[in-house]
Amino acid sequence: EFVRKLKHQNVRLRVFAFEPEYHDGRDAALAQSIRTFHLNNPTFSIIALMGNIHASQTPFQVGGKQIVTTGTLLKDLNPTSVFIAYVKGTVWVCMPDCGIHEVRSEWGASEKAGFVDEAPWPGYSKSYVLSSITASPPAVDALPN
């Protein structure tokens, strides 16, 4: 709604979805979508909303496997990566079953909500602390049959 109001005020702004179909390498596909938008719109600043691991500018080790993250693949564009921290809440993820899961974090628990000039892992410029988060189930589940 906020974006809609800005557009009515003639603010030069675009919203684009960058989750493409992919067969292998989700982070590479995300990075390519963002890079393509950047190449076609070189005067725009881009704010890309994605999960913390994808946003990292350092490859991640998960379960003995290295993930070359979207942030790593876009490092040449000089991005600012913000780690989103939270104290508690719920997320909709597949870990291992898909659905709403409760999550809790000790990192950032002593901070008040807002920007913090540090992050719990390398690969981020800073963090933004939220007091809580709430799961957002996939929109496709809400579509009528």
Image (cartoon, rainbow, N blue to C red):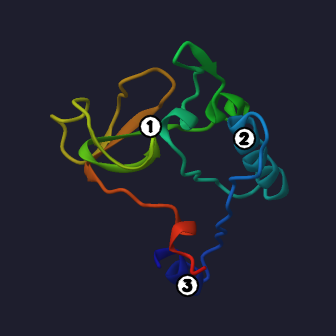
Relative to residue 37, is residue 120 depicted above or below?
above
**Residue 99 position within the rendered picture, expressed as x and y whole percent measured from the top left:** 42, 51
Percent of width and height locating residue 93: 45, 46
Whichever of labels 3 and 2 marks the residue nearer the N terminus, that label is 3
The residue furthest left is 110
Q: Which mark is residue 31?
A: 2
Closer-to-camera residue (12/68): 68
**Label 2 crowd (10 A; few <14 / some 14-19 / many >=20):** many
Q: Nearer the viewer, mark 3 or mark 2?
A: 2
Q: Amino acid at mark 2?
A: Ala
Label 3, label 1: how far apart the Cα atoms are: 42 Å
Task: Give the label, 1 or 2, closer to the camera.
Answer: 1
Q: At 18% from the left edge and 44% from the top edge, which residue is drawn?
A: 112
Front residue of 96/122: it is 96
Q: Position of residue 55 (x, y in %)?
A: 55, 37
Which residue corresponds to mark 1? 95
Q: Residue 8 appears in which quarter of the rendering?
A: bottom right
- Residue 122, disc: none
